């Protein structure tokens, strides 16, 4: 989940009653708004099991060291089993795929939250740019690309506020494990995402929820360049926050993201919150920095994305 800490195809669907438009073709993590931008008190409160971008309180689901170790062991077993069946990436190579993306625009009765097709197109461009390693010479190209597979618009006051989220996701989700569903809502967070190892247990809710005003051109200062979707998609692919586990060698299970004790707010160059080697990776998409501060996934994160995709989504 990404929080604000003073940040932190088919057919039309039934909405608050009826139908809407569909634009053809083209796991959990979360995040919070500044206090003065918080919605009313009846807004969505993330359940245990969510992971987030920034925010106060338990905005990431607790993954204990024991659970983390179990997830890694399970992933290794799945990769081994798939390799035995010929479903594996050649030694030294990385998985690569084109991911179909379905946008679900959750408007209220007054039309609030109705982002434009241009904003959705711009968000798609951000996903392709960030996962393509195009924002920095130090960034890894993950090999994953994204294609808009459909845009669905709904009129439902509760869904707009992310109420009944398990219900609406199960009713509206499209595609299989390889399809990224993005629900655009108005809540107290920047975004919430499911992890790939949770797909088999609850496929109906798999995907990411993103604050509609965090898309390119949105109204949330410092978080309106579309990077929230990149952060949440990182979780959907199987990445932890860079500060997962704090100042430990295990950290986020990625060797080339230096350990950090806590999440970043803003873009504090030179921040070094751990005695272990390396400055805090404040430019990494899996920290909680400003959108303008983000510019990279590392090669190690790219490898993890490849392994998680092969194990859980391929």
Image (tube, helix red, strand yellow):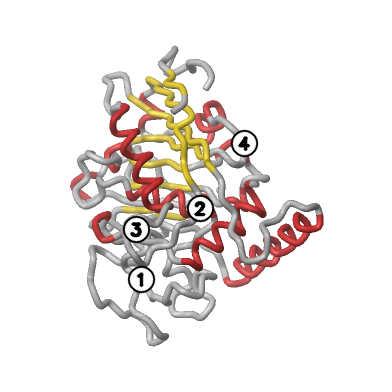
Of pointers 4 and 3, the one earlier in the residue sequence: 3
According to the image, label 1 marks what residue? 281
According to the image, label 3 marks what residue? 54
The answer for how far apart the CA atoms under marks 2 and 4 are is: 20 Å
The answer for how far apart the CA atoms under marks 3 and 1 are is: 15 Å
Q: Residue furthest right?
A: 84
According to the image, label 4 marks what residue? 176
Q: For the residues carrying marks 3 and 2, which lies nearer the camera in this image?
A: 2
Of pointers 2 and 4, the one earlier in the residue sequence: 2
**Label 1 environment density (alpha carbons within 10 Å; few <14, some 14–19, many ≥20):** many
x, y percent for residue 305: 54, 57
**Label 2 environment density (alpha carbons within 10 Å; few <14, some 14–19, many ≥20):** some
Q: Quadrant of residue 107?
A: top left
Of pointers 3 and 2, the one earlier in the residue sequence: 3
Q: Residue at x 37, y 20 (%)?
A: 155
Secondary structure under tag 3 reads: loop
x, y percent for residue 187: 34, 40
Secondary structure under tag 1 reads: loop
According to the image, label 2 marks what residue? 143
| Location of residue 156 with respect to 271 vertically, above or below | above
Q: Residue at x 43, y 67 (%)?
A: 242
Q: For the residues carrying marks 2 and 4, which lies nearer the camera in this image?
A: 2
The answer for how far apart the CA atoms under marks 4 and 1 are is: 33 Å
Q: Is 200 left or right of 206, judged from the image as shown?
A: right
The answer for how far apart the CA atoms under marks 1 and 2 are is: 22 Å
């Amino acid at each position: 989940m990404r929080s604000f800490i003073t940040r932190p195809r088919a057919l039309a669907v039934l909405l608050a009653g009826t139908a809407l438009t569909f634009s053809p073709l083209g796991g959990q993590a979360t995040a919070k708004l500044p206090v003065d931008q918080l919605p009313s008190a009846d807004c969505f409160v993330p359940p245990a099991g969510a992971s987030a971008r920034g925010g106060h309180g338990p905005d990431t689901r607790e993954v204990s060291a024991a659970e983390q170790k179990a997830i890694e062991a399970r992933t290794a077993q799945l990769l081994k089993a798939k390799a035995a069946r010929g479903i594996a990436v050649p030694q030294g190579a990385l998985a690569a795929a084109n991911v179909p993306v379905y946008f679900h625009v959750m408007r209220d009765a007054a039309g609030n939250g109705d982002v434009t097709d241009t904003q959705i197109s711009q968000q798609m461009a951000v996903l392709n740019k960030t996962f393509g390693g195009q924002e920095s010479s130090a960034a890894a190209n993950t090999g994953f690309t994204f294609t808009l597979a459909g845009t669905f618009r709904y009129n439902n006051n509760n869904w707009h506020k992310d109420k009944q989220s398990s219900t609406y996701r199960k009713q509206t989700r499209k595609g299989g494990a390889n399809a990224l569903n993005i629900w655009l809502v108005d809540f107290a967070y920047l975004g919430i995402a499911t992890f790939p190892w949770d797909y088999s247990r609850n496929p109906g809710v798999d995907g990411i929820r993103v604050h509609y005003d965090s898309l390119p051109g949105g109204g949330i200062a410092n978080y309106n360049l579309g990077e929230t979707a990149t952060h949440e998609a990182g979780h959907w692919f199987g990445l932890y926050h860079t500060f997962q586990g704090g100042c430990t060698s295990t950290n986020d299970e990625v060797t080339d993201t230096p350990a950090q004790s806590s999440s970043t707010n803003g873009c504090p160059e030179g921040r070094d919150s751990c005695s272990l080697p390396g400055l805090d990776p404040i430019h990494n998409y899996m920290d909680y920095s400003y959108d303008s501060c983000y510019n990279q996934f590392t090669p190690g994160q790219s490898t993890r994305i490849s392994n998680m995709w092969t194990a859980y989504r391929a």
